Amino acid sequence: MTNLITQPYRRPKNSNDDNYLVTLAKEFNLVSAVKAAGVATKVNLSNFMNVHPSGKSRLWAVGTSAPGKRAYEKMTPGDLVIFYGSSEIYAYGEISSKLVWKNNNYIWPSGQNWDFIYSVKNFHELSEGERPLYQELRKVLSKLDVQSVGVRSLYEAGISKAELLDFLLNDAKKSPKKISKHAGNIKSQRDVSQFPPKLGEKFINRKAIWEEFGGQWQQGITTFPNDNCLNVFSDEEGPYPDYQDPVSGIIEYRGQGLSGNQKLSHGNKLIENARLSKNPVRFWFKPAGGAWVFYKWVIVSDREPIVELDSLGNKAKRVLWYLTPVNSPNASEWPKEITDLPILELPEATQSSPPKSPETFIDRYLTLVKDSPNQPQSKTTSAPRTNYKRSRKLRQIVIERANNLCEFDGCTGMPFDLKIDGSAILEVDHIDALGEGGIDHPSNMVALCPNCHESKTYGRGKSKMVKKLKQIVIKKESNLLGLNLANTPEAKPQSPSPLLATPALAYPLHPPLTHPLLL
């Protein structure tokens, strides 16, 4: 049974007293805080660590007041929690775990005795102009506590979690956009029109960028005051699985909107306008544990609809943008292949479903093998749009072929952690580098853990490792596609791979293929 937790919070004028900024705007290392307080033996972190093995999570707490204690006792993991203040809802997420830390005055700067702590996942903050009025909840929930933290059963209200969020995000009346009280009247330190960000310039967090240039400090797609240039932000530890191809430099950037189908509105509309105008865009990047940096200039070269799981774990249509690096904001300095890229006429982002792919993994694998060129491609600073779209699909199918395991049979250990989407930390590499005549084809691609990837790139035995990887991939494709490759010069006779749970012969035989590595 899913509950709705309504959590009020009025932000203080002084941001140094803002509990929200300490543990909700970013992940907080609870394990370190418990150890620093010297109460590790008194605080049971077992459930928290089961859900958050890194020891970090977004956190909130309720105090020892009667309403807070009652709400905490009714909470269960998976419950939806919304945060509201000044008559509007400004954020939401899901409860992932909860624990008790008696007389806790060590984490949050304001208040005291935050005894009941819960962690939050799939957290999303709504920007000004998109925040539903808190009173709109009464349209779907007849009983609503407006005084303090409260709990409401969605089952008893006759509405699901997804339906409630859909109402709040799409149908509920929104609070008008206004100057944030939290921001005060802080004047930016730099006039962007006179002193724009410098390539490579670093800032400790988004708030520091906001204080320097003004504007909005939470959205991933925004412009600065007195500046027409679009800025897009990508956090390696954020909720969007953005990706940069190490060979072409192409950046796969997820559109704005964590829950439900994405549309060409708000931030996505800004990116679409940049694509149509071919205007340069600043790409900001924050590596894991690092600072924000103005990483490079890009142009928005293309987009396509894809289907992925949203923040609630439901399949939803997303917009995947392709950002192509350029060496400056001046179009006269761009390579010819960049200036000649056509501005494509594309349909509305999610009006039509992407083409349906074959149902089985083997059929999808075979389709990509047949459609991918088996000859080296010419080297260019920017891959053609069909190439980098195919590369994304090839990378995904190779990860799937790996079954979330490093494909090198001599692997001595993978990272214990997982990516945000729950998948294994694997990197797809070309066995023979594209720059050295290798082909962009599954037969020349392998999924490796970061350790094995480094060994293959820099290790003293990398030549032997490359030969071994070719044998491993040939063996896998022999099993997958029914190819007779067992006695080729690249692969010695081997027994069927135990990694492949479904033998190729369980499917109708496909036309014989010539293996590209043996040409």
Image (cartoon, rainbow, N blue to C red):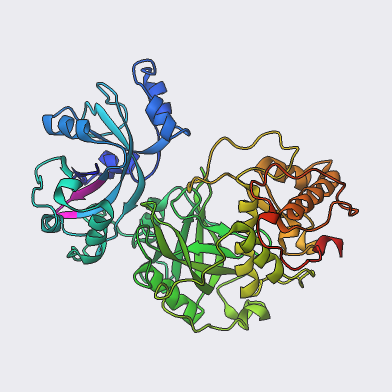
Query: Residue 396, position in %: x, y?
Result: 60, 57
Based on the picture, tell me whether residue 493 belongs to the magenta stretch: no
Is 384 on the left or on the right of 191, as rendered? right
Identify the image quadrant of residue 378: bottom right
Q: Reply above or below: 17 against 318.
A: above
Residue range corresponding to the magenta coloring:
81-88
Query: Residue 402, position in %: x, y?
Result: 65, 48
Residue extending farthest right: 489
Query: Residue 2, position in %: x, y?
Result: 25, 43
Towards the viewer: 321 or 188? 321
Is 54 on the left or on the right of 429, as rendered? left
Towards the viewer: 318 or 14? 318
Q: Quadrant of the N terminus?
A: top left
Based on the picture, tell me whether residue 83 belongs to the magenta stretch: yes
Q: Quadrant of the C terminus?
A: bottom right
Chief SS of the magenta region: strand
| Residue 185 visible in image | no
Residue at 63% from the left image edge and 74% from the top image edge: 386
Is 477 on the left or on the right of 2, as rendered? right
Residue at 12% from the left image edge and 33% from the top image edge: 67
